[in-house]
Image (cartoon, grey):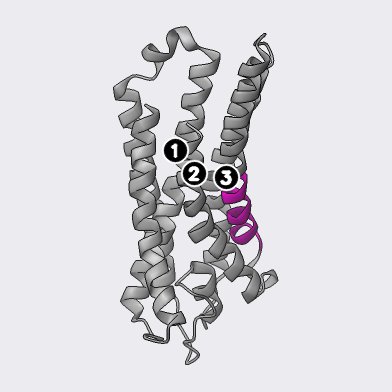
Amino acid sequence: PMYLFLGNLSFLEVWYTTAAVPKALAILLGRSQSISFISCLLQMYLVFSLGCTEYFLLVAMAYDRYVAICFPLHYTTIMSLKLCLSLVVLSWVLTMLHALLHTLLVVRLSFCSDNVIPHFSCEISALLKLACSNTHVNELVIFITGGLVIVTPFLLILGSYVQIFSSILKVPSARGIHKAFSTCGSHLSVVSLFYGTIIGLYLCPSANNSTVKDTVVALMYTVVTPMLNPFIYTLRN
């Protein structure tokens, strides 16, 4: 099961970074300073949907570790192929529909003559700042769905790790405890980095977020976290 989730995570992050980084590099090199509205919406949809999919995949991976450590004798029975495939498919479908909702809400907005995006990619928070029409509905939907799509999975991961650490402390081997804490600690660090930046960006009112803050936070979860994941999920295991 872990390799199935890792395969999906790797596939996801290839497209996740491809959706934003090449265009950002082109801007930095001065080759292309513009993007069409349709391309901007497509980039926003891909970054939003793929980023949300990673939330659910991280939850599935945390649940897999929870079952493996807390219920080792029933691991193969609980983590069946059917369950694993269901978790993967559900993660992709739900997040695609979630991203589509936000994309449609952006399409209904009116944009002024100021069409310079204060960001290195078409982030939804950056686009809302350019809108002339009222964006309260967009911000309300972001806040409500953010609690369901971002905070809830984060709490599930924390709950899984509380149970994992409780089981680890019962292991008599000091070496086993150190190894388990080391592996889970690295994974939990990346989860905290990824979720922390997302929560700080999307669950705070857009008026309180400076352009520099938005850019730095987006850079963390778009570039830094995907760069660290291969080390965490490959070398550590």
Nearest to the observer: residue 4 or residue 141: 4
Left or right, 164 with reference to 15? right
Q: Earlier in the sequence, mark 3 or mark 1?
A: 3
Q: Residue at x 48, y 18 (%)?
A: 68
The kind of residue on which mark 1 rests is Thr
Q: Do callouts 1 and 2 mark residues in contact (Cβ within 8 Å)?
A: yes
The kind of residue on which mark 2 rests is Phe
Element marked by disc 3: helix
Q: Is residue 200 magenta?
A: yes
Left or right, 106 with reference to 221? left
Mark toward the viewer: 2 or 3: 2
Residue 113 position, x and y percent, is 47, 92
Crowding around mark 1 (Cα neighbors within 10 Å: few <14, some 14 to 19, many 20+) is few
Q: Residue at x 39, y 43 (%)?
A: 9
Residue 194 showing in the rendered view: yes
Crowding around mark 3 (Cα neighbors within 10 Å: few <14, some 14 to 19, many 20+) is some
Q: CA distance from mark 3 to mark 1?
A: 13 Å
Q: Quadrant of the N terminus?
A: top left
Element marked by disc 1: helix
The dot on residue 190 is 3
The dot on residue 231 is 2
**What secondary structure is the stretch in magenta mostly built from?**
helix
The residue to which callout 1 is attached is 234
Magenta extent: 192-204
Q: Is residue 171 magenta?
A: no
Residue 159 showing in the rendered view: no
Residue 18 position, x and y percent, is 36, 62
The kind of residue on which mark 3 rests is Val
Q: CA distance from mark 1 to mark 2?
A: 5 Å
